[in-house]
Image (cartoon, helix red, strand yellow):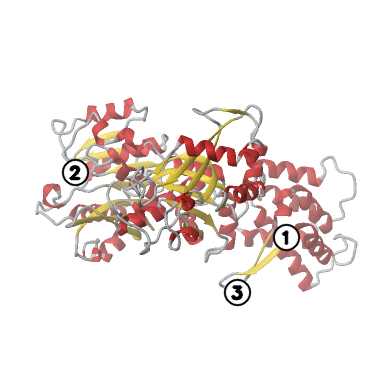
Amino acid sequence: KAIQNTFFVLLCLINASETALLDQIEKMTNMTHLFLAMTSAATALSFFAVPNPKLSPSGSGASSAMMSIMKYAGPTQKRNRFGFVHVSCNAGMRENKGFVKGKILNSFFNLNRRRSTPVSSLLSRHLSTNSLNNSSSQRQPPSTRYLIHWRGEHKEQYSEVFRQWEFLSAVSATIADASGICDASIVLKSLKERAIFTNAFSYKRNDQLAAPASLSQDEMYNQALQYVHFTNDGTDSHLICNEIMPQITPKNIERATKRCSLIHASFIVLADAPSYQELGKKSLLSRSFEGMIQESGTESSWRFRRHELSFVDDDENPRFGKSSTRSVQKERAALQQLKSLLTKIQGRVDLENADIEIYLYEGLHDKQRATESLDATTRHSLFKILGRKLASGSTHSIMAPKTRITHTNTPLESIAAYLLCNIALIKDNQTILDPFAGSAATLLASGLIIPSVRTVGIDTATNESTSRDDIREDFKVRGVAEPAALLEGSILQETTRDKARECIGDTAFDVVVTDPPYGIRESMSDTGVENDDSAALSDLIDVIGRDRKCGKPLLKPDGGKLVAFLPCPRGVDIHDVLPSRQRLVSAGLHLQQKSEQKLNDSLSRWIISFTSI
């Protein structure tokens, strides 16, 4: 698109067609594309020395234009991995796009004559309605750090392997939904390269320290609270980077947090330090704190909370590494220490439903961990992190199996259902199919995450064994739109698949998300022969391939997502269980990512994510 714009602008310049150039600018909604087009065209004119008296009268019009661009736009240049120079506008250009565009145009053409609508006004009005990026006041600097407090593990190594995957997937889907920039999979690929997670607190065993907790609990403690920030470094296109990075805003992080099952809460970091005094000084210099003060007004309410991640030998906090604790007495002491800082916040205090929630986390850090004993002095010199709470994680427990009206023999737990949906990058108005629906936990989770999705479930169970009326009632009582259909039948039957497509307007589904039945309990191939644990998923991929070849795809080509659990006995290589490459090629699927969850000593299950190509 940028290349097309460049050639068109070049033709306008050669012909000195002011009207055509203004018309082209009106059609261009991407600031970077416009900037590239005009600089490239001006450079081409300079190289070929195209004379044209209608261009700017001060010498070469192209040279003058380039000087104007350099002066007002302040471009930056960087070579990408292919050796091409990438040119982009700086923050100053973005702050006053209309003015800059007007200056550039005035350098190309002598537009000093009176106009009914000045060029700068025309461009400013155009940009205010068509800009793809958020306003500069909503953007955060690249150095903005966030703090993630992960949910505690009820079983060691049960869900921590999925934490970052779910979070980045939720952020990617949120950005794609909010901005419409590009496909969520492209955003996810970019964020994986740019996201850096580091432990906020850390504890390492030392001979001087009593350590009744296990090594795994040490690791749980270290990973309970993590910083995350996003760098500008990556191997993808700089144009993609320029589109995505401005969208990593506190608002989008907040939205993503609310749909994550493995996050307790997310925060924007105001400051961190080993002492209250230093914490206060760093907070006053923080742009995030300054922005919070400007946002807070006399009508806003706020509250302060202090949490301490428990000590390894602290009898008061036996759930070491699994949760934080709150002491009202210590919280009051912290308030006194930070009084001069907190009094700058306007508005009233509201302990129940505050608009602004400020949290202080304290815990062991590298500076304290291996060289100091846990004496009284150390207890009062814990590393401190001050942050503003953005959001709490999802309330997935409202659909836990014990709360459901529908009862099945093997219900899918709520966290697992949320994980599948988030990793599938579900977005507004998408269509979702679960071909092994069971109690429809995945469909219920998708509706709780994105209310606008349309869902269809297929299952071989009869109404006597699994009441579809009870399933619909589960949706109603939670305020979620009922599935478009809950079909009784097998995904292997062509008539069943046709009915599923009819329910969404005879088109392919955007997402297929499922927890297939395991082994001989339910999995049967179309020949009626019992298969291994991977048979159900392999059969599903086969029918996706058949329908695709017949011209009535079940999964949307070029961007459709298939996400499923796949069981694998411990000690067995996952590649021996995965569907064969031939199957995937036939179905037009590409294996995007996989990750293991240990269920017990003999069985693991993997989340497998495929993308339709």
Give 543 or 483, whichever is nearer the viewer. Answer: 483
Quarter-of-image position of residue 374: bottom left
Amino acid type, mark 3 = Gly
Instruction: Determine whether, in the image, residue 564 is placed left or right of residue 233.
Output: left
User: Mark 1 or mark 2, which has the lower sequence index?
Assistant: 1
Are there few (<14), some (14-19), or many (20+) residues within 10 Å of tag 3?
few
- Of the numbered discs in the image, which one, if any, rests on residue 490? 2
Amino acid type, mark 2 = Ser
Residue 93 against residue 122 in the figure, above or below: below
Q: Does residue 177 appear in this view?
A: no
Instruction: Give percent across and percent down for residue 69.
Output: 78, 60
Q: Calculate the distance from the C-alpha at mark 2 to the C-alpha at mark 3.
A: 53 Å
Give 92 or 284, whichever is nearer the viewer. Answer: 284
In the rendered view of the protein, which quadrant contains the C terminus?
bottom left
Quarter-of-image position of residue 219: bottom left
Instruction: Give percent across and percent down for residue 526.
Output: 14, 51
**Which residue is the site of mark 1?**
38
Q: Calculate the distance from the C-alpha at mark 1 to the C-alpha at mark 3.
A: 21 Å
Instruction: Give percent across and percent down for residue 317.
Output: 36, 44
* Element under disc 2: loop
**Which residue is the site of mark 3?**
83
Residue 98 against residue 581 in the figure, above or below: above
User: Mark 2 or mark 3, which has the lower sequence index?
Assistant: 3
Give 557 or 396, whichever is nearer the viewer. Answer: 396
Q: Please tell me whether mark 1 or mark 3 is closer to you in this view.
A: 3
* Element under disc 3: loop
Are there few (<14), some (14-19), or many (20+) residues within 10 Å of tag 1?
many
